[in-house]
Image (cartoon, helix red, strand yellow):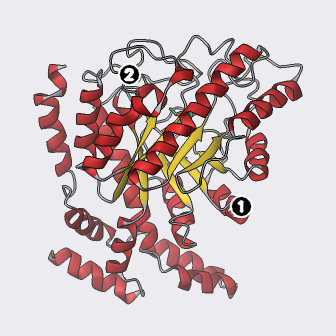
Amino acid sequence: MSKAYELAKERYAEIGVDTEAAMARVKEIPVSIHCWQGDDVRGFENPDGDLTGGIQTTGNYPGRARTIDQLRADVDKTFSLVPGTKRLNLHAIYLDNLGKKVERNKIEPKHFASWVDYAKERKIALDFNPTCFSHPMLKDGMSLSHPDKAVRDYWIEHCIASRKIAEYFGKELGTTACTNHWVPDGYKDIPVDRYGARERLKDSFDQIFAEKIDKKYNLDGVESKVFGIGAESFTPGSHEFYMGYALKNDLMLTLDAGHYHPTEVISDKISSAMLYYHDILLHVSRPVRWDSDHVIILDDELKAIAAEIVRRGFDKRVHIGLDYFDASINRIAAWTTGARNMQKALLLAALEPTEKLRAMEEARDFTSRLVYTEELKTMPFGAIWDEYCLRCGVPVGEKWYDEVKTYEKDVLSKR
Ligand code: RNT
Ligand code: ZN
C-alpha cells in the first residue's frame, strides 16, 4: 500500500467515506466494452465495406483489426489495461462465419461459438446487438419501418436470430446477456406520414419480441435516436416511441448519451427511468456537436451518469455499455482511455458521502450542499484511483500507454 493511499484513505475517512468499501464496490460493477472501437464498426462480414446507417467513423490511423484473431488480440490488450469487471459487447457483423458467407437473417449460435469459447477462457460475459446497417437490405435508409414487407421481414428475422444468439450466450456463460436493438431508420426530409412509419416499426418489434426468452438468459433493450446523417428530419424510433414501447412491453430502455438534442443529457433521465423500469441500458458516449461518438473523457456528464447510478444503488439494474469509436488515434488507446474513464467516474461516485449531502438537501441547507460538493472536487482521488488499479492488476497512471506503444510497434504497425 502506498503512502499516498494511506494519507488519502485518512482524508476520506474524515468526511465519512470508506475507501476500501468504495473500491470493492466499483470492482463488481460490470461495464460492457464494445468490440467495435477496434475496427471502426466494420465487422468481419465485409471488413472493407462501407459503414452506413447514418453513423460514421472518421480518421484512418493505421493498425485497425481486420480479422477476428486481430480483434481478439486487441480486446485482450485493452482488457489487460482496464480495471474492474468487464463484459464484451458484440455486434452481429462480428460473426465467425467459418469461411462461408452467411445472410444476416440466417445467423445462428454456431457462428458465435468461437466467441463463447473465447469468453469462457477469459471468464467474461458477452452482450449482443443485431446489425441493421452496412447492408444492401437497408433500403432508402430504412429497415424495420420500411414500407416493403420483404425488407421488414428480412430485418425481423435478423433481430429474432440475434435474440437467440444472446440467449445462447446467457446459457453458455451463466450470466444474462443484454441485447440492444438500434435501427438507423429515418428520413432525410420532412415526412408526411410519421404515424405510418412508427406503426410499421411497432409492428416489426411486436413480431421480434413475440417469442419470449427467459430473462435469466437475455434482456432486450431498445435505443432511440433523434437524428442520423441522412436521417436529419425524422426517426421513427424517437425517444418517446421507445419509452412507450419498452414500458408497455417490459423491455429495457437504452439511453445513448449522443442521441438527444445538444443540451439534453442522459444523466438526468436515469432517475426518471428507474421509477418505471426495472432495468435500463446505457450507451455511454460523447457527442461533440452531433452524435460523433468521441472517446469518453472524465467530464461533468460522465461523472453525473456514474453518480446517478451509484447514489441510489442501481449497480445491477443500470447496465453500463460503452459506445464510442475514434479512428483518428491509436484504437487501443482510445478504447482504454474511455473504459478507464468510466471506471474513474464510478469510483469518484462511490467516494461521495452521499447520505450527508442528501441530509443537507433535505434540511434545505443549500449553502452547505454547494460548499461540500465543491470541496469534494479537490479530495485526493488520484491516490485512490492508483491503488484501485494496482489492486486490479492493471498499470497505474499513464504507464498503460507504454504498453500500448510497445503493442503498436510489435503488432499494429505490422498489419
Ligand atoms: C448508433 C447507435 C448504436 C451504434 C452501435 C454500433 O447511433 O448509437 O448503438 O453506435 O450499435
Ligand atoms: Zn448507441
| Mark seen at residue 272 | 1
Question: 297 left or right of 146?
Answer: left
Q: In which quarter of the image is residue 360?
A: bottom right
Residue at (14, 20) in percent of width and height? 414
* Image height of 42 relative to 226, above or below: above
Question: 350 left or right of 185?
Answer: left
* Residue 194 visible within the image: yes
Q: Is mark 1 on a helix, strand or loop?
A: helix
Q: In which quarter of the image is the N terminus?
A: bottom left
Q: 310 and 6: which one is in front?
A: 310
Q: What residue type is labelled 1?
A: Ser
Is ligand 1 closer than 8 angstroms to the Cβ of mark 2? no
Task: Choose the circle earlier in sequence order: 2 or 1.
Answer: 2
Q: In which quarter of the image is residue 260?
A: top right
- Dot 2: few (<14), some (14–19), or many (≥20) neighbours within 10 Å? some
Label count reads: 2
Residue at (42, 86) in percent of width and height? 15
* Image height of 86 relative to 314, above or below: above
Question: 10 left or right of 271?
Answer: left
- Dot 1: few (<14), some (14–19), or many (≥20) neighbours within 10 Å? few
Gap in angstroms between the C-alphas marked 2 and 1: 42 Å
Q: 338 and 279: which one is in front?
A: 279
Q: Which amino acid does label 2 sit on?
A: Asn
| Mark seen at residue 97 | 2
* Image height of 127 relative to 136, above or below: below
Q: Is mark 2 on a helix, strand or loop?
A: loop
